[in-house]
Amino acid sequence: MAVPNLKIYVDETIFDGVRLRLSEALEPIRTLLCDAFRVAPPACQLAVIRVLGMPDQPPINTELLILPHTDRTDEAIRAAAERLRSLLVSVTGARVAVRIAQLDPATYVALK
């Protein structure tokens, strides 16, 4: 199972200033995801991506894809989103948006 899959989109206006701190935070972020979704580290895929966004959007936008599981209730997913946002705000000092979507296991394919 190749989830959670986290993409952290960082606006180019702040990228250089937060790159090193985000790089150092990848391990704690992965630990947070492993704890929240009860997966082993190899199941996680994380990427930090420099983007050009609109000035009125949060400069950091995260998109997390997960597969459904009985433990992954709305409450548990929301708690994980809040923990992730809090961690990223503390690391970057920037406004952060977090979005989490559940994939359809019947149509999801991952080759590693």
Image (cartoon, rainbow, N blue to C red):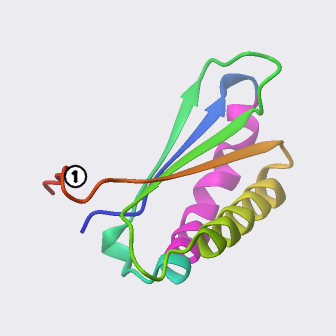
In the rendered structure, which segment of residues is drawn in magenta? 14-33
In which image quadrant can residue 36 be found? Answer: bottom right
> Residue sitting at 86 percent across and 49 percent down?
93
Residue 70, position as x, y percentages in the image: 42, 80
**Number of marks present in the image shown:** 1
The kind of residue on which mark 1 rests is: Tyr
Residue 29, position as x, y percentages in the image: 59, 67
Image quadrant for the N terminus? bottom left
Task: Say left or right for 107 vs 22.
Answer: left
68 and 49: which one is in front? 68
Residue 4, position as x, y percentages in the image: 41, 63
Task: Say left or right for 14 vs 108.
Answer: right
94 and 14: which one is in front? 94
The residue beneath circle 1 is 108
Q: Please tell me whether residue 43 is drawn above or below residue 105 in the rendered image.
A: below
Image quadrant for the C terminus? bottom left
SS at badge 1: loop
> Residue sitting at 75 percent across and 23 percent down?
13
Q: Please tell me whether residue 36 is drawn above or below residue 59 in the rendered image.
A: below
In which image quadrant can residue 10 be found? Answer: top right
Residue 79, position as x, y percentages in the image: 70, 72
Asked whether 30 falls inside the magenta stretch, the response is yes
Asked whether 26 falls inside the magenta stretch, the response is yes
> Residue sitting at 39 percent across and 80 percent down?
39
> Residue sitting at 62 percent across and 62 percent down?
24
In the displayed orientation, state which residue is furthest to the right. 93
Instruction: Assign the magenta stretch its main secondary structure.
Output: helix
